[in-house]
Image: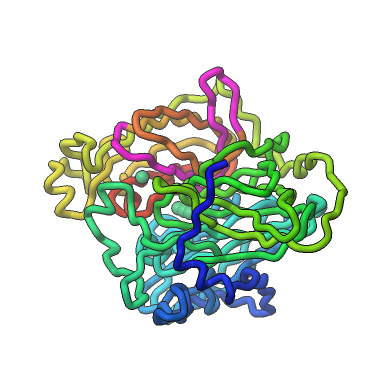
Amino acid sequence: MTTLTRRTFLHAMSAVCAAGPALAKSPLAVLKAAVAEQQVLPTEYPATPLWTFNGTFPGEALRIKQGDRVIRKLENTLPQSTAVHWHGIRIDNAMDGVPGLTQAAVEPGGAFDYDFAVPDAGTYWYHSHNRSTEQIARGLYGSLIVEEAEGPDVDRDIVLLLDDMRLTQTGEISEDFDSMHDKSHAGRLGNIVLTNGRMDLSYDVQRNQRLRLRLINASNARIFQLGLQGLNAWTVALDGMPLDQPQAVEGSFVIAPAQRVDLIVDVVADAGSEAFLIHFERDGGFAQVTFDVGGQDATQTRPAPSPLPPNPDHGRTDLAAATPIPLVMEGGAMGGMRGAMMGGRRMAMRELVQGGQAWALNGVAGLPEAPLVDVFQSETVRISMRNDTAFPHAMHLHGHHFREVLPDGTQGPLRDTILINRNETRDIAFVAHNPGDWLVHCHMLSHQAAGMKTWMRVQ
Ligand code: C2O
Ligand code: CU
C-alpha cells in the first residue's frame, strides 16, 4: 500500500472534525431548493454561499424503505428554474425530472409535486437536472437511500457523497460554469475535494466493526480513484444493484461521476490508529475519509459478507433478439471532429463552438429530434458505444439499469452509468421495461451541456 500523505493544511481541521451529517428525517414533505451558506473551507476562510435542498449541503439525506413512495413538493426559491432527477430509480417517466423531456423546469417561486414508488433497494442520489453543470456545482444534490426489507448485518451504515468544488479565494463558487475549456476537455474539475461537503471528514469506529460504506460520486466530472488502508472490504453493490457475489476489494478502484459503490468493510486497523478511504491523485494518496480506530481490540473475526438480497426482475436480456444500436461519441479538444448536425443544420466545428457545443453523438450535437432508440416495451436493446474522443465519458441511461456485454459474450453487473475510456467500444444491453422518454447522456456535466446527449423512447 502506498504511503499516505495528508494535505498539511488539513491537520488544522482535524480537531474540529466530528461525524458526518446526521440522517435527517423531516416530517415535512417539502424539498426546498434554497440559497444557504455553509462552511466548506477551513474556518479562517468565509462561509460558502450554496444552493441547497432543504438548507444543507449536501441536501437532505433521504431514506426510504424499498417499495415505499417518495412524496415531496419541490419548492423553488432559487433565482433560476430547476427540477429534480432521482438518479438510478426505475421511476415513472413523468417524475424523472428532465426539463424539456419529462416536465417543464420549475420557475423561481414555483413548485412541483414529485410522487413515485421505489422498486429497488440500494444507494441512489438526487440532483438538479436543469443547467446541471451550474446547479450541481452550486450544491443541488443529496443521497437517496432505499433500504432492503432485511439489510446486511453491519454495525454502521455510512453514506459518503464524494465531490470536488471549484472555489475562489474568498470561498465563493467559481462562476465559470460555461468555460469552453471545461466543456471541450475533461469537464469542470474542482480545486478542493470533499466528502459530505467537508474537506476533512472523519468517523470514530472500533476495531473489528463492520461498516457499510455507500460511496456516491456527485462531482461534475472527477473520476475518483480510491483505495483503503486498515479496512478489509468487499464490493456488494454497484449503482444500487447488488452483485451476485460480494467481491473482495484489492488495490484501487474507480468511481466515475454519478456512479455508486457499496462496500462492506471490516475495520482491521489497530485500536488507537487510523484507517482511511484513500483518494489517489497523480502526486500521491490523500485521506478522503479518516476512521479513528478506538475501543477494545475485540478478537472476533467474521466470515465474508453474504450477497445483498436481489432486486426485483429487470427482465431477461436475450442478446440474440436484440438489435445492436451504434452510438459514436465524437468531438472535444484533440478529437478531430470537423462538424456535426445541430438544430437540423450541419455546422462546422468553429460554429458549434461559438454556440457552446463541442461534442456529438452519432453526428448530432445536443438533443436530436429523433430518439437514438425507439422500441416497444419489453424489447431488448443493445447499444454499442464507441468513444472516438480524447477523453473518458461516464454514459448514463435514465429509467433503466443495463448490463455490459463483455468481450466473451457474458454480461456484467447491472449498472446505470458506464465509464468509457478513449478508443474504447463498450456494449450495453437491457430490457426496455419502463415506458416513456428517457435521456441518455454523459454525466461529465460540461460535456452534457456541450452536446453529449440523446434519448430513448419506450412505448
Ligand atoms: Cu444523474 Cu441525467 O442524470
Ligand atoms: Cu463526457
Q: Residue at x 79, y 52 (%)?
A: 208
Q: Quadrant of residue 317?
A: top right
Q: Nearer the viewer, residue 333 or 82?
A: 333
Q: Residue at x 45, y 29 (%)?
A: 426
Percent of width and height locating residue 140 = 46, 68
394 falls in the magenta region: yes
Percent of width and height locating residue 302 = 84, 44
The residue range painted magenta reads 388-412
Q: Residue at x 48, y 47 (%)?
A: 280
Percent of width and height locating residue 451 = 29, 48
Q: Is residue 437 visible?
A: no
Left or right: 270, with 440 as reference point: right
Is the residue 289 above or below the residue 46 in the image? above
Tag count: 0
Is the residue 122 above or below the residue 144 in the image? above
323 falls in the magenta region: no
Q: Nearer the viewer, residue 242 or 294?
A: 294
| Quadrant occupied by the N terminus | top right
Q: Is residue 100 visible?
A: yes
Q: Quadrant of ligand 2?
A: top left
Percent of width and height locating residue 43 = 46, 80
Q: Residue at x 39, y 42 (%)?
A: 393
Left or right: 417, with 332 as reference point: right
Q: Quadrant of residue 160?
A: bottom right
Left or right: 218, with 245 as reference point: left
